[in-house]
Every structure is written in C-alpha cells, then in structure tokens.
Image (cartoon, rainbow, N blue to C red):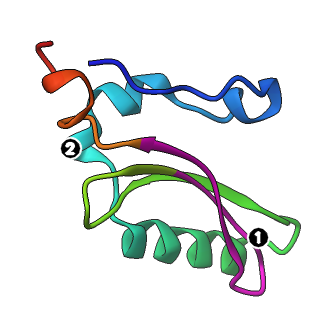
Amino acid sequence: MSLLLPQNPEIRDLVDVARLVDFQRLPTFREAKHGAVQMFESDSAVSRVFAQSIRANGDIHLLSFGPRGGVKVLWNFGDPLKIGGGLNA
C-alpha cells in the first residue's frame, strides 16, 4: 500500500500513520464528527479537533472540526484499495 502523505510538516505531524495502516478501523465521517462534538462539549478550552475518517467512497481524509460545526478536509489520502492495487501491492 502506498498512500500519498502530506509534505507540509504542520499537517504531516497530525497524521497517525499507524491508524492509516489499519484503515478499516477508522471512524466514518459521522462518527468522527460526533466524537468532535463530544470533545467540544466536554472541554470548553478545545478550539479545534483533528480526526482521520474513512468516507463512503473509500477515501481516507484528515479532517479539522471547529467548535461551531465547521469542517475542513486538510488532506485526502485517497482510497487505499485503489492506490497501487491494494494492500499487498
């Protein structure tokens, strides 16, 4: 498997490569957003939540959630099953 990793050092520091390897256990977008909402509700000092999620089309995204519901896709890693012919390529 070869995923396109971000070259920007600030974004690359947010990437949990170990979770990307086991991408089938990543939360869905809805689960990641729910987790972010819970984080904001539990701690008022939190200004941003970062999460990796797998989308319905199979793409893996690094997301940034804001306290008022805003969501930014910081990086799209693509679909690991399509990149390089799958995990065993």
- Vertical comparison of 60 with 5: above or below: below
Describe the element under mark 2 as helix, strand or loop: helix
Residue in front for this viewpoint, 55 or 24 = 55
Residue at 76% across, 73% down: 66
Q: Position of residue 7 (x, y in %)?
A: 70, 23
Q: Quadrant of residue 27?
A: bottom left
The quarter of the picture where the C terminus appears is: top left
Look at label 1 and name its amino acid. Asp
Furthest residue toward bottom: 68
Look at label 2 and name its amino acid. Gln
Describe the element under mark 1 as helix, strand or loop: loop
Magenta run includes residue 63: yes
Residue at 88% across, 67% down: 45
Magenta run includes residue 8: no
Q: Which mark is residue 87?
A: none
- For disc 1, the marked residue is 43
Q: Position of residue 26 (x, y in %)?
A: 32, 48
Furthest residue toward top: 89
* Mark 1 nearby-residue class (10 Å; few <14, some 14–19, many ≥20): few
Which residues fall within the magenta stretch? 62-77
